[in-house]
């Protein structure tokens, strides 16, 4: 205590000077319009910045929650529509929402991982789509997660058809740009136009017919060629892919077993 008093006495003049400076600053600030408004403006700016940051954080988490709810709602709507179709034509298509937790887009053998696995009823070979169109096919299934082979993988082939006339082709990725893929096996006698819509063919149990795939970006047919070279702009934007739906088909196992019996 005595030491503290000695220190205060030693620096008393300096402490009095600081106190007077602070008092003078406050008097100037609150008795003059410009300095006072400047102080208040600075304080308001700081408070406004804090509110903005909090608002943006709340908005981010709120938006993520809304996106998850929207994905689940889309799946419920597709299931309702599929149930009506099932009554009419005996189909058995179901949809289950999932979130993409890992993905590559710049490799020849791209893949993506979703947060659904065997505990959720996911099976190897099921199709995967999003609100825009085809995404890929489930390749491996774990308890909590599954790995999907996307259509931007050079090992992936997808049976497609032209929406305008049901002509069949095969979609393959050339490993160059995740926005495009090539449609092969389209004969020269076909009339192909830029903007033609490409959809799933329905010729396999993986995807029902009519899921959007993309549109024709351009096509070439060299003299003497029997088949077109067709570039398709994919509907699915893999660079921004966050939520998907796993397509279930209650008849898939039966159909695959019948096909395997022919080999």
Image: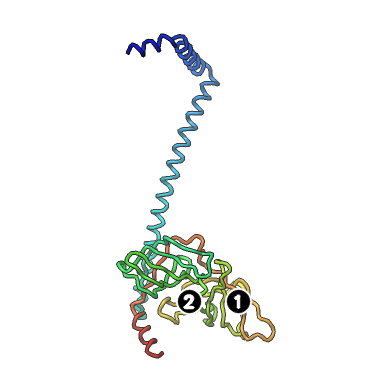
- Left/right placement of residue 192 relative to residue 27 reads right
Residue found at x 44% / y 69%? 129
Tag 1 secondary structure: strand
Is residue 180 placed above or below 70 in the rendered structure? below
Mark 1, other Cα within 10 Å: few <14 / some 14–19 / many ≥20: many
Q: Nearer the viewer, mark 2 or mark 1?
A: 1
Q: Give the residue at x 48% y 30%.
A: 44
x and y percent of residue 66 in the render? Answer: 40, 54
- As rendered, which of 241 and 194 lies closer to the eye? 241
Residues at discs 2 and 1 in contact (Cβ within 8 Å): no
The one nearer the camera, 133 or 46, is: 46
Q: Which colour scheme is used?
A: rainbow
Tell me if residue 40 can be seen.
yes
Q: Which mark is residue 200?
A: 2
Q: How far apart are the alpha carbons under marks 2 and 1?
A: 16 Å
Q: Residue at x 60, y 73 (%)?
A: 231
Report which quarter residue 127 is drawn in. Answer: bottom left
Q: Which residue lies furthest to the front in this view?
A: 3
**Element carrying mark 2:** strand
- Label 2 or label 1, whichever comes before in sequence order: 2
Quarter of the rendering containing residue 100: bottom left
Residue, disc 1: 230
């Amino acid at each position: 205590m005595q030491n503290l008093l000695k220190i205060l006495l030693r620096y008393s003049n300096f402490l009095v000077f600081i106190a007077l400076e602070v008092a003078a600053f406050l008097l100037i600030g609150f008795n003059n319009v410009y300095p006072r408004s400047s102080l208040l403006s600075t304080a308001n700016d700081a408070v406004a910045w804090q509110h903005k940051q909090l608002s943006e954080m709340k908005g981010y988490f709120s938006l993520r929650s809304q996106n998850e709810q929207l994905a689940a709602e889309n799946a419920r709507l597709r299931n309702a529509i599929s149930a009506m179709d099932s009554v009419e034509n005996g189909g058995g298509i179901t949809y289950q929402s999932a979130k993409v937790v890992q993905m590559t887009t710049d490799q020849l053998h791209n893949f993506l991982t979703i947060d659904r696995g065997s505990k959720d009823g996911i099976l190897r070979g099921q199709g995967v789509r999003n609100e825009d169109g085809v995404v890929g096919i489930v390749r491996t299934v774990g308890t909590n997660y599954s790995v999907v082979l996307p259509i931007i993988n050079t090992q992936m082939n997808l049976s497609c058809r032209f929406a305008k006339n049901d002509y069949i082709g095969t979609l393959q990725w050339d490993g160059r740009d995740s926005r495009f893929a090539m449609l092969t096996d389209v004969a020269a006698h076909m009339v192909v136009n830029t903007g033609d819509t490409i959809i799933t063919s329905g010729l396999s149990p993986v995807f029902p017919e009519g899921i959007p795939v993309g549109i024709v970006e351009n096509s070439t047919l060299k003299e003497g060629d029997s088949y077109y070279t067709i570039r398709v702009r994919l509907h699915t934007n893999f660079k921004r892919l966050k939520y998907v739906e796993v397509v279930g088909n209650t008849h898939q196992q039966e159909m695959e077993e019948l096909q395997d019996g022919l080999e």
